[in-house]
Amino acid sequence: MIPRYTPREFLELWSDDTRYQTWLTVELAATEAMEKAGLVPAGTASAIRAQSLTLSAARIDEIERTTRHDVIAFLTHVEELAGEPARWLHRGLTSSDVLDTSLALLLTRATDAISQRAEALIAALAARAKEHAKTPMIGRSHGIHAEPVTFGVALAGHLAEVKRAAQRVKAARAEVAVGKLAGAVGTYAHLTPQLEAEALSALGLTPETVATQVVARDRHAALFSAFALLAAAIERLATNVRHWQRTEVAEAEERFSQGQKGSSAMPHKRNPVLSENLCGLARVVRAAVTPALENIALWHERDISHSSVERMLAPDVTATLGFMLERATQVVEGLVVYPEALARNLAKSGGLYFSEGVMLELVGAGLPRQRAYELVQRSAMRAWSGEGEFRVLLGADPDVTAHLGPEVLDRCFDLSHTLRHAELLVQRAIEA
Amino acid sequence: MIPRYTPREFLELWSDDTRYQTWLTVELAATEAMEKAGLVPAGTASAIRAQSLTLSAARIDEIERTTRHDVIAFLTHVEELAGEPARWLHRGLTSSDVLDTSLALLLTRATDAISQRAEALIAALAARAKEHAKTPMIGRSHGIHAEPVTFGVALAGHLAEVKRAAQRVKAARAEVAVGKLAGAVGTYAHLTPQLEAEALSALGLTPETVATQVVARDRHAALFSAFALLAAAIERLATNVRHWQRTEVAEAEERFSQGQKGSSAMPHKRNPVLSENLCGLARVVRAAVTPALENIALWHERDISHSSVERMLAPDVTATLGFMLERATQVVEGLVVYPEALARNLAKSGGLYFSEGVMLELVGAGLPRQRAYELVQRSAMRAWSGEGEFRVLLGADPDVTAHLGPEVLDRCFDLSHTLRHAELLVQRAIEA
Amino acid sequence: MIPRYTPREFLELWSDDTRYQTWLTVELAATEAMEKAGLVPAGTASAIRAQSLTLSAARIDEIERTTRHDVIAFLTHVEELAGEPARWLHRGLTSSDVLDTSLALLLTRATDAISQRAEALIAALAARAKEHAKTPMIGRSHGIHAEPVTFGVALAGHLAEVKRAAQRVKAARAEVAVGKLAGAVGTYAHLTPQLEAEALSALGLTPETVATQVVARDRHAALFSAFALLAAAIERLATNVRHWQRTEVAEAEERFSQGQKGSSAMPHKRNPVLSENLCGLARVVRAAVTPALENIALWHERDISHSSVERMLAPDVTATLGFMLERATQVVEGLVVYPEALARNLAKSGGLYFSEGVMLELVGAGLPRQRAYELVQRSAMRAWSGEGEFRVLLGADPDVTAHLGPEVLDRCFDLSHTLRHAELLVQRAIEA
Amino acid sequence: MIPRYTPREFLELWSDDTRYQTWLTVELAATEAMEKAGLVPAGTASAIRAQSLTLSAARIDEIERTTRHDVIAFLTHVEELAGEPARWLHRGLTSSDVLDTSLALLLTRATDAISQRAEALIAALAARAKEHAKTPMIGRSHGIHAEPVTFGVALAGHLAEVKRAAQRVKAARAEVAVGKLAGAVGTYAHLTPQLEAEALSALGLTPETVATQVVARDRHAALFSAFALLAAAIERLATNVRHWQRTEVAEAEERFSQGQKGSSAMPHKRNPVLSENLCGLARVVRAAVTPALENIALWHERDISHSSVERMLAPDVTATLGFMLERATQVVEGLVVYPEALARNLAKSGGLYFSEGVMLELVGAGLPRQRAYELVQRSAMRAWSGEGEFRVLLGADPDVTAHLGPEVLDRCFDLSHTLRHAELLVQRAIEA
């Protein structure tokens, strides 16, 4: 988490203060369930809650320097503050009960913050896709002009992809909304499954099916995988913005704010720097998947190798992804689209993209497919070399006109016919 | 796909013959839908089907050396064989319509082959977990003796994890069971959404929401992520088998077949080579996630950079994962468990793992938590240093006996009480 | 290794036949050294060599199905063929002595095959860079026109990068040119360091400093890292070819062979498919780095988890990289460069790229930098919006002409001055 | 960079203050060279230097919020502070000239800080390897007892590996000690190669051979690869410490400090948490390699996608690796080795590890290798099953004693003979 790429919400979410406060929340929920189970004197949790403790991260760190154990340091500090009732906290629990249940709370909150931002991006994409549902654009495969699409259809493809990615994040959220209050090796040696279920339910979580000392790490890896897929959806969008904005294409560009300077040396430049930045950040989010997967194979009932990875990557990845979503939304909302440029580029191919329609008519007229292909390619290659306009060359080729009359050729060159399903496609993405 | 790690089913599934036959299946399904739409003469598909074509991969390769385009080579070959009606094939389609729809068919078949093998592993784990639900074992965190579990509970943890992983693979299957018959840039220029839906439905697939020239690659990356998570679940299991088998632990080992030789130099060795192999293969499967994610951000309406990645990794990853599942099942089914060794290791800690129960009783008796901790640690450290048995040392410590009578201490040292929830945990994994 | 992306040399190098033959080579070299040390009867190796054994991979596989140990199967087969003297083979060796020393021989051969192909790519880049050292081209940052470069300078940048990458591969070759004949756990229990040094030297290898049962795997990971860097150098080149070829840029394109078909639907298309393919393959080569790094931390004196990774990735990565180099060389050699298109694109910016020179002159004439920047940006923004030619607008701005006379402005707009160092840059890359 | 894993030196190195101060250093070095070239009034740099500017990161950030360009914000701030002479700064430079040259300075400093810590780890390993050069230990392959090594030899293997890794880091340092003062697209449009060479030389750097707008990113990826290899060397060491410390092995353990608490629930536990932590951090460092490789293929003369990756990963990776080296050194220096435990474990195999020597003697006595193998395996398997001591069983097997007398068997069972090369191996690692 570096300030530049961290929305405030994530900064607070992953602060020491929030972490320790979350630990306390978990301890109190567990204590409350223990009270009902008769393991702890009734009223313990509410007595501590009533004190509205303000935990000091600095003090906990100080204690940890001696104990070298963070949860013990935390409990010692809570006992310092809350006195007598605090000694009932953590009864029968192991550190990981608190840490993993807290991590579930923090990760689900972070995931919700991400999902909320994903919705904003989805809304922006839907609005712009609708706006440009019928704005013609040359489709490109291999970077080469292919057949026409619309700008709205292009955005609709991104919309559908971001929606799928957001859906996966939601599915993965359920996988990490799992806590554990099952003791040192997950056997409820000094606890009970009922107690755990009750305490976790109060926290909005469900119990791990079979815990070791910890909640299984495949759950977290699944979440990080879902994050990487969302980042990749943004990367594809950002890559295309960069293509659209490049000087020779110039079909759309990021909004250039007043006062912004594109380059210290070239004052005329308007660079798609937000989109480039998004491509870089996608690499960072993606890079967390492998360590998350490597974290799964802990030894026996657990080793603690996963912990440092999560300490570094959970805040980094969620904050960066949250930032990416905000930035991507801003790019989409502010995207300046140039329909004239779109039209100009579309015109550049001289209708070559209608070749397939012609070919299909030739086949329909009885020619073998390969023969039809060759006939069309002949005129196409000449048009491509600047020897004339494609439509004209076809109309002047007796091998073609022997099979197709001028009105058939005209129909093949009708753009609105080609794009007749564009609005449907946009609608499908919106409704998906 | 190297023979050593490729089950026969996958070898056939990813053969050239199967690929070309699948292309033909897709072409014919599309043609049939076109017949209904009146775009192609009725009976075309059935006329070709009636010929039961045997495609020659060698011949297609030969043609491709000239055309440098695989689908055109394929169509040319089909036309060679099927004659006249074949010229109606591929009408209005683009290569990717055939390739991506075929890939969907192949990947879903491969995924089904994986899911089937995952079920076998799940069954094996369930059986062994049940068998050893009550076999005591020392739980270990950090590789250090912690508190007791049972061997069945340890297996149940793996069972639950493999089940989750298998479930994710199934969810991801739905994401790639998506074809596309929408033409050069996904706009149905010479086709219709209805026609696509019909043809794909006949193939057991659904249409891409908004295609570019291709089906979106986030779908495939999601599948590869699910595969990596399943491989990681196997890796954790295999890692633990390796730990259980190591000389000093010797609690369980891979079945050693007659005639097998452990080492060319050390004839007495029985090495967990299957499990080590599984750990290596998990790295290979995991390594496919990043390129699959990198494949997503194709340029504009597509570039073909993803293709080589998929050509290499789709067979490799699915075959390797299929092999891993077979091998893991074999390891679990054949695992030789040594209850005496489990008991011997459990005894090594001299009951130190009961420390927490004692501590909880001391807290229950009114001691501050940290004081209770220190009292228990005192005897524990002495027992650890070989100065006596833990139970005895505690019973001889007046600071302890001032609070706990001998019958309370005895209760703390009752193994069956500690493990009273073991069967429930196994049951939870089986029912999950 | 799939046939499509595997040069014949690599197919042979990684065949079963070559592998077993290499094992025999290692065994014989070791035996020869043992003869000198008096551990084995003199003449053993030469007696076996004299038989010119033709090993049968099929037979070895058959034996391995019983022994489940490849080296023992190999030795059994050699004994079948060579009789009596063969029983002296492998004396005091462990399987890994043979396997790792053989792997060193195979990997260095594969690396040499790669280096040779890298040299071809370097030669092609040097020739084309020289050819176009003075061909002007608009430089682009962020995909936006910046200041002029030459096509040769652009290629020279790739040349210098490929050279660095090739150099790293050579450095990494030395790291894996390391064998091991030190017995079961590397202690020379039944061997001597002298014997090892002698045998390895005959094979062109050096001994591992301190072996475990195996040669340390950081060596192989370093090689795979170097491979990934070379693949990335090709990826950057291929990415730029794709940019140069895109319809709107059209400055250079891959040679389009006779008979080649760009698309089944759009006969006019010439797609940079070779370069796109190279980008995909770079992902595959890069993906091997992480498993290679994960292979390093073997347990104790070794576990065999690395083996499956290497079996799959060593052939795949080296063959794919060899193929990439061949293909990249073909792309560079065949690249069709369009100087008119280069000139046309260069002209598009209307000289805006000379803005920095103007700004520097204004600063030189005494203006504060930010003021100079604003003055230049003013005309630049107007030119960018189509309100006139940049040179003219500047000449008509009294705030500018107050400081700069027309002849100074003319000097600022001199392309040959801007590119005066281009040939030097090309030369530097060639000589690097 | 999170405080927990960041040595102070790296915190300062990557602070905003240091960054801006480094930019100023670069600007002044460039200005000085420009003065000599007559492009800037003599004395400009020294006039600014004389003011000993204290840059305000907060102020620069404030300006950047308007300009959205960090270097322009920085220059504006310097002009605020330094007045008139500051307008000569940055003459003919592009932002990347300053940024990339500064990055080279920061990365080489970070690399030096890492190399220095690597030397400390090397010294610690050398000392402990020497100390235990002759301390016998059972070697293990596959986690199973193999033949004896010494604890010093095991450490010497790690020593040699860390040394190789440190050497690679040094080699990679040279690759990034490369700056660039070549203007917007690397052509020296308003500068000269001489001027660049001079300024960079004053900074301890060399010029990029052929720059684009930036220094080529393969250089940085090579550095990050070297870092990952060093992290992996530590990971292997830490993995083995974890194995040595596990309860059943207990041959060595991390120093347990006074006051440290192993577990909140199990007071007797001494966990190898430092080593586990190192394994986790190795995953983090390794994860930076792929994004660094992905950063290489920038578009045309550059895009800025690499920047965010470097902003996040350069501090994270260098600080984490610096921390890992400090922690690994502390683990090695503090490692408590238990020779009695080593001896006890060694004894467990009942001399089975001498099997190979016996087999070699049988072969030497004229038996076919496979027959010898079977004879030894026979007794070995019985000893393994607890039917007697290996040496005794062999001596009672007439098929063995027919070929080997008791004195030969005794020689085979001599530990000091087996380990006669141990000191040499340690010495080789120290001298490597």
Image (cartoon, coloured by chain):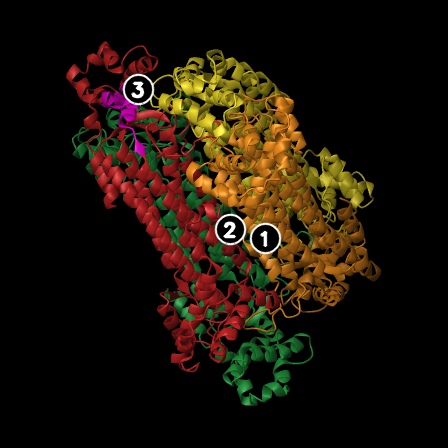
Chain colours: A yellow, B orange, C red, D green
x, y percent for residue D81: 31, 26
Disc nearest the viewer among 2 and 3: 3
Q: CA distance from mark 3 to mark 1?
A: 56 Å
**From the viewer's perspective, is residue C111 above or below residue D193?**
below
Residue at 57%, 59% in the rendered image: D242
Disc nearest the viewer among 2 and 1: 1
Q: Which residue is mark 1?
A: B6
Q: Earlier in the sequence, mark 2 or mark 3?
A: 2
Examine the structure image and report whether residue D85 is included in the region drawn in magenta. no
Overall secondary structure of the magenta section: helix
Q: CA distance from mark 2 to mark 3?
A: 48 Å
Disc nearest the viewer among 3 and 1: 1
Q: Amino acid at mark 1?
A: Thr
Q: Residue C253 lies in what quarter of the image?
A: top left
Chain for mark 2? Answer: C
Q: Which residue is mark 3?
A: C348
Chain for mark 3? Answer: C
Residue at 54%, 78% in the rendered image: D369
Q: Which residue is mark 2?
A: C291
Q: CA distance from mark 2 to mark 1?
A: 19 Å
